[in-house]
Image (cartoon, grey):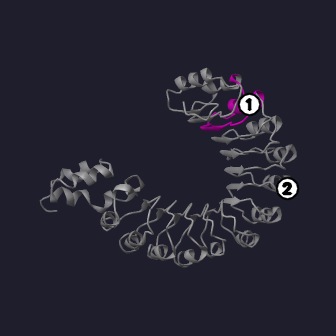
Amino acid sequence: MANMEPALPVVFAFLPLPVLAHVARVSSQWRTVAYLPHFWCYLTLEPFLKNMDEVAVTSLLRRCSQLQALSLRGLDDTGDAILSCLGAHCPELQVLDLSFSYNLNGSSLSSLASCSRLRLLQLEGCENVTDEDLLPLAASLPIAHLNLSHCTLVTGASIPLFPRLVHLNIDGCPKTNQGLISRLAQGSMLKSIFLDGEGLSEASLIALIDRCDRLEDLSVSFCETLSNAVLRKLSDRPCLRSIRFKKGLNFDDEGFICFFSIPRPSLIAVGFSECHKFSDAACELMASSCPNLEKVDLDWCWDLHDLSISEVFRRCPNLQHINLTGIKFLSDDALRLLPDHCPRVRLLNVTQCDSVDDSRLYALMRHYESQIEIRNYYGEVL
């Protein structure tokens, strides 16, 4: 370091990490500077995994003593050597994404027990992970955010053993049972919960809502068995940030109107996908109750009309994500309001909306200067 050009660390600080890796080949001095640990605190490696073998990945991680966040989505092998390297050389690691790493197993995951600061772990789609594999992590790590979505072997037996959980995603885990939901409701710190509704009893969900005093985000998929009683219970929670129910076939105006009858300025995301009884009256009340909405998913809410959707556009100027798939009565008349009332829109999905003309969609593209993704009737991105 004594002979290091003083300007190199300053210049290198502005370089993207792939460029840093290239300039490290120029000379030994440049290599020393390029691999200073504070440059390598946040890594996203999945775009490069196809061109990096296990030796290359572990060689890089050994230099990353200050690594705080790492994304390794889609690891092809078991990850034994890589995760062992993380445990041995990356003591500052706090965030780890291993989603869709299908060959992960208990042996490789146990190495993470040495990452004593790990607080967010993404294991979505890791089909071989079991509750037994999670036990060493529950006993030793301060994990607050745990994503086990579509980890189909997980029953949930290990989940209550994570004492600091704030965010939990077990959507797509059909083996979780009512006993787990009851245990989660006991002294829970949970703020964000994503559940698979298949086989979920209404009584256990209501008990969970009742006991989770800090609840901010709730998502339940395939909730055909739930009724308005759930929406009535949620009406006691004015500080919700997001709510999503998929296939709430038994919800109707009574429940929706009860939920939206109070002001909800903190609610920024609403999803009622395939809730076929979500009506114009409920939609208009949502628009007036939730002025700060940023995301709405109303796909396959068949009976909505231009008038109620127009109210959403007029009253919710912060909208960015709008999914109106399958709303057969939606027309260009409602979409004409978007440029004047919703300047921040970045996604508009009108797949299977019969009365929406592509010419209106192209006009929106021109207005938003191509900073918007629009899907037309066929689901094609314009």
The percent coordinates of residue 378 (x first, y second) are: 62, 33
Residue that carries the numbered disc 2 in the rendered image: 229
Residue 311 badge: 1
**Callout 1 amino acid:** Glu
**Rendered view: 234 above or below 212:** above
Q: Residue at x 52, y 23 (%)?
A: 366
- Pick the residue in front: 335 or 166: 335
The answer to whether one can see residue 133 in this image is yes
| Percent x, y of residue 359 | 60, 20
In the image, residue 221 sits, relative to residue 107, either above or below, namely above
Q: Earlier in the sequence, mark 1 or mark 2?
A: 2
Q: Residue furthest right?
A: 254
Q: Nearer the viewer, residue 200 or 377?
A: 377
Label ID, residue 118: none
Question: Residue at position x 27%, y 52% from top?
Answer: 20
Disc 1 element: helix
Chain part drawn in magenta: 306-332
Q: Secondary structure at mark 2?
A: helix
x then y, percent, for residue 8? 20, 52
